Amino acid sequence: MTRQSKRTSSKKACAPTFYNSLTGRLEKFTPLDSGKVKMYHCGPTVYNFAHIGNIRPYITADLLKRMFLYFDYEVTQIINITDVGHLQSDGDEGEDKVEIGARREGKSALEITEKYARVFFEDLAALGVDTNGTIFPRATAHIGEQIALIKILEEKGYTYKTGDGIYFNTGLMPDYGVLGSIKNISIREGARIGINSEKKDPHDFALWKFSPVPSSGALRREQEWPSPWGIGFPGWHIECSAMAMKYLGDTFDIHTGGIDHLPVHHNNEIAQSQSATGEKLANYWMHSEFITVEGKKISKSLGNSILVKDLKDRAIHPLALRYWFLGAHYRSPINFTWDAIKGADTALRKLYKIYKERLDPEHSDVFESPALDDFMASVSHDLDTPKSLAILWQVVNDEKISGQEKKFLFVKFDKILGLGISRINRELGAATERVSEADIPLSVMLMLKDRETARAARDFERADSLRDRIKREGFNIIDDDDGPILYRVSSEER
């Protein structure tokens, strides 16, 4: 649990309102316990890199955490790590994604999940996500809790057995599919791999899957555990319910995730949790919308997944992606283009430059500013970050606001926005000292000019190659508005 210290500046109190996917309307937030908020966010399946579409919901979760901390709430935040049980389709068919990843890279399941969990945490750090105090439980560390929950459902008559596992009987829940007002949800045919004819209803879902029998010719699973129903592994949905209930109780305040989780995964969570406890799982459900890339859905077949490391390879600061996310409402679909992210990078660097060079180096923490009230009102209104950014730029351009007050507002705004405005300038301060042209070898100058030509021609592969060669010569590059800046790097960085 984390709590922010009391603020020294006064401002109007803002009662947060959120769009609740459960009711389909904006609602004032009322916590279960005064001054406290408990949140669960569906985490990654750690079998491969997370692309920018996967990442977006964690920015939403981080904004919620930052906002609640700003208002002095005690925050309990859970982001699970799925390291077993996530099959290829929503219909509980196909192979476990972790097992596929292990075979793909010739590693063990543990090696795969450790590798991609580490990359996930690195991506969160690069994007300014505050993980201080956040709990990241892993599915494999909570097998006992999942088995115990399935046993409760079995005792209450909600389960049945098929040849490949133990299933939840959705037919016993008259309001199944209540989330998002989806009354007759369907399992997307394109996402299904095979059909289990033993299911009583296509919407029924696996709680426990049996491991393949070696004599059947199927590959033996690497991850499996004993259970009252036989050797096997938990279904994907049961892990979230078991871990949410362990860390947050039978009912908690807010559950978030990507919009793709709403029709099946989240409705399944509600079904199994509420059948087991008789209590509401979460009071507020919030979903981040899809991202397209150049107007097309992100898919393996198109090969258009954009990763955080791809931004770094093109000398775009990862926080530019966060800035780009903030420029659209979390419930609005957005379309990624390289021109758009370069524009976000330019805007972000302008903010850094303004903060560093144009604002008063000393600032007070006692301003009572209408701009701060407007900013917090925008954030509190269903995380209206496009309006929040607009207010930030209004402050930048308002000549009636003093440099001291602007710096005060930058600091306050950034507690929510998480763009690292003051931190990043400390990091870039020493790095942006231009190396005298006389001290740059001719070979490096020629490569630098060649790289600028390649960038202008959008030949990023060549530009990246030249960047690496320049680094081996002892220089790093920051692409500033006024052109590339060279600075020296230590021998350890080469």
Image (tube, rainbow, N blue to C red):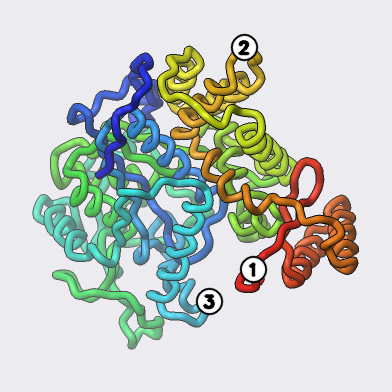
Percent of width and height locating residue 159:
19, 55
Of label 2 and label 3, which has the lower sequence position? 3
Of label 1 and label 2, which has the lower sequence position? 2
- Distance from disc 3 to disc 1, alpha carbons, whole Å, reads 36 Å
Q: Which residue is mark 1?
A: 490
Residue at the extreme bottom: 215
Percent of width and height locating residue 402:
58, 17
- Distance from disc 1 to disc 2, alpha carbons, whole Å, reads 44 Å
- 394 vs 102: above or below: above
User: Of circles 2 and 3, which is in front?
Assistant: 2
Percent of width and height locating residue 12:
37, 14
- Distance from disc 2 to disc 3, alpha carbons, whole Å, reads 60 Å
- 230 vs 401: above or below: below
The answer to whether mark 3 and mark 1 are in CB contact below 8 A is no
Residue 234 placement, left or right of 154: right
Which numbered tag is attached to residue 104? 3
